[in-house]
Amino acid sequence: MYKISIQKEQVSTHNTMCIDASETPLQAIKAMFLCVKKNKALEKNNKQKTIKMSTIPWQERPENSNDVMWRYSENPIIDRYAIPSSNSVFNSAVVPFGDGFAGVFRCDNKAVQMNIFAGFSKNGIDWEINHEPIVMQAGNTDMIESAYKYDPRVVFIEDRYWITWCNGYNGPTIGIGYTFDFKEFFQCENAYLPFNRNGVLFPQKINGKYAMLSRPSDNGHTPFGDIWISYSPDMKYWGEHRLVMKPTPFEDSAWQCTKIGAGPIPILTNEGWLMIYHGVINTCNGFRYAMGAALLEVDAPDKVKYRTQPYLLGPAELYEQVGDVPNVVFPCAALHDIKEDKLAVYYGAADTVVAIAFGKLSEVIQFTKDNSL
């Protein structure tokens, strides 16, 4: 039997003896009820305290499983009809925030108009998503035109939460914005010319500059795509574009032979930047998306140290194989706990729902090294 848990500091509850042997039966019964009421209140108070100690969602590896990553037994965690207007909720980003977590969610409505919505959770599993989309204010520009927004990523850098997304401005490009509280949002200049997707910021400056991964593309369902990195001194002007990774030859690793794209925010480890990414093969039944990992040099992340030949997670469950776009595992966010050696990856499944998978951080890193191209 599976059990989902949030790692937290244990708070002990001591039940006190509330019944005195000298009391009458009626007095004893009243004392017992007062004792139960007191202990329930204490347990509720302790539960509220432990919520504040939460780190990341976690579920142990199922028995008889040797997989480096495994799915949450109650997937999907967010249904396609999570808010009244939605046709689908998928490819979304989450971060620790306050006593729990906040997120930016891709919600396509029933006209299949694409937009992003804020949401909140105490445990990273059960989410309350706002029913109205995020309304942007002018940030470092007055040009905040947007025909659509989708596939967001979120990261905390320095003093605020930065959001990137695929922004519709005469074709897809990378939109950038920020928030301090997930209530007010400020849109900045688009990072690049159209066409581009999968803009993923690093969580800290590299050699004094902001750094972002992206995948130059076209205006349709791109049949190609490499991962690039670009740098900026101010989150407005981007340059120094460098190639990071290309799709693989079909005979070497076919699951990622058509196109690739960065997924969650890279994680800094002792072995380098851990970059979770998606890879695509064009099959006789259309595109198939799976999840892989790479390790990049810390100070020169355009240099790939290791890259998985086999995928970490591919579409196998019904909710990944059946949906608006079948056979899709599309990672967009990851929560990690270095001390506890835990990794939780949020991914869009079949372009319809949000699911989560778990892994030991050290095992994912070792798997990437041991099974590298």
Image (tube, rainbow, N blue to C red):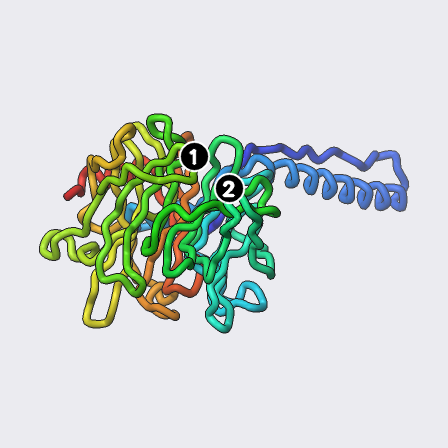
Where is residue 14 drawn, in percent x and y?
68, 33
Q: For mark 2, give the secondary structure.
A: loop
Residue position marked by numbered label 1 in the rendering: 234
Percent position (x, y) of residue 208?
A: 37, 26
Q: Position of residue 369 (x, y in %)?
A: 20, 37
Q: Is residue 52 left or right of residue 274?
A: right
The answer to whether residue 360 is seen in the rendering is no
Residue matched to label 2: 140
- Which residue is at 62% across, 32% downward? 12
In this view, the residue in front, 235 or 16, is: 235
Kindly identify the amino acid type of the residue bearing the numbered disc 2: Asn
Disc 1 marks a residue whose amino acid type is Asp
Q: Residues within 10 Å of mark 2 (few under 14, many from 20)?
A: some
Instruction: Please determine whether, in this image, residue 272 is positioned above or below residue 330.
Output: above
**Which residue is located at x 49 percent, y 73 percent?**
111
Query: Cβ–Cβ below 8 Å for labels 1 and 2?
Result: yes
Marks 1/2: CA–CA distance: 10 Å
- In the rendered image, the quadrant that contains the N terminus is bottom left
Instruction: Decide which of 60, 332 is in the foreground and name it.
Output: 332
